[in-house]
Amino acid sequence: MRIEDIYAAAFGREHLATLLEQLVRSFDARSGFLAFAVPGAAAFQAQFGNDPAWLDLYATRYRQHDILFPRLMQAAEGQCVTAHAMLAEPAVRASIFYREYLAPTGVVDNLAVNLFKQPGLSAHLALIRRAPAPPFADADRDRMQTLVPHLRRAIYVGSHLSRALDQMAALRALVAARGNAVLMLDAQRRVVHRDPALADLLALRDGEPVRLPALAQAIDAALVDGRPVAIELADGADGPLPLLVDVLPVSRDRFADLGDTGAIAFLVHLTRLDRPATVAIDAMADFYRLTPTEARVLADVVAHADLIGIGARIGMARATARTHLHRIYEKTATGGQAALIALAHRFVTMSGPHLNR
């Protein structure tokens, strides 16, 4: 078991199964798993050599009967323990968990370690031996103990990388919900990340410079001038594509430049100019205590910016519509259509049309 193999698992959950396989083979075990537990629930983050049907049975039926887990949890963080002696105890042998789960699967020992024990979350590594294999020896436990610091570091680094990816995904989801998109570039203007909707629409490829000359020039101009630039790109599918290009330089740590691509140096925010924003009419109506009818009038004004046709569009006499409109002006302290629409656009929601057609 090489130490460098352990750290490879930090760079993606897909490597955890490989790490478990190497540990299982190195310790002459039959199977192994890495599990995260929170109050009232647990999940297998990775496993090797286990029957998926039995893992599912554990999660759905036998976890509540696991008589060993509370005792294994008593071990200090980072301390390796074995379960063979526990499995010989009469109380354990008589338990539902042993009779219906452990014995049928031939478990003879469990080399376990609580890699992390934190309030609300714990991480557990377990290697399982099954009959006719012998239980783990003290030498096995001691050898695993020497690997624990490296395993803890690898899982810790991997957890932080996963958190960073989750945060990035959340930001992308926020931007996409607004109907906009974000393009991330390194210092050489190469694409570090692009929204999937942009890939074909704007001919973007990870690791390559921006291909469309008009977009590349707009990005450069926005950087030089320090203000957004509006452009119109040719979109063969549905005609011209008007965009507002806004570029934000990102403060970065050169330590992050190690890798296949450089660190993110610029965020390019792209807004479609041919699609309206989505205004939270209901929230605005509640905030200003508008009646349901006034809310209908407000929605029509924001959508059409036309006062004359309100009544015809919503099935209301023109004079009645005008009366409701003036009540809206009073309640919102706007006094007119222009100010009312400007106010409404302060209630723009996260959800909106996607950049991709």
Image (cartoon, helix red, strand yellow):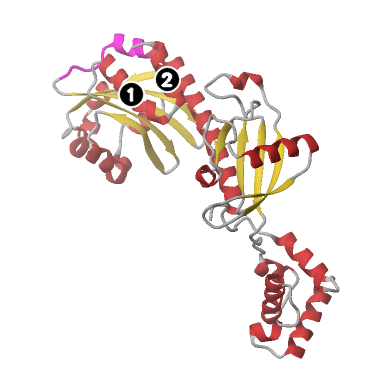
Task: Read off the magenta span.
Answer: 133-144
From this viewpoint, is residue 229 visible? yes
Rendered residue at 67%/86% (across/down):
312
Residue at 63%, 30% in the rendered image: 189
Residue 166: mark in rendering? none
Q: In front: 256, or 247? A: 247
Count all numbered tags in the image, as a single digit.
2
Q: Contact, CB < 8 Å: mark 1 with mark 2?
A: yes
Residue 153 pos. (x, y %): 49, 19
- Assign a secondary structure to mark 1: helix
Q: Position of residue 105 (x, y in %)?
A: 18, 32
Q: Which mark is residue 18?
A: 1
Q: Which residue is mark 2?
A: 8
> What's under tag 2, amino acid-wise?
Ala
Does residue 319 sit above or below 51 in this rendering?
below
Report crowding for label 2: few under 14, some 14 to 19, many 20 or more residues within 10 A (C-alpha).
some
Q: Is residue 142 magenta?
A: yes
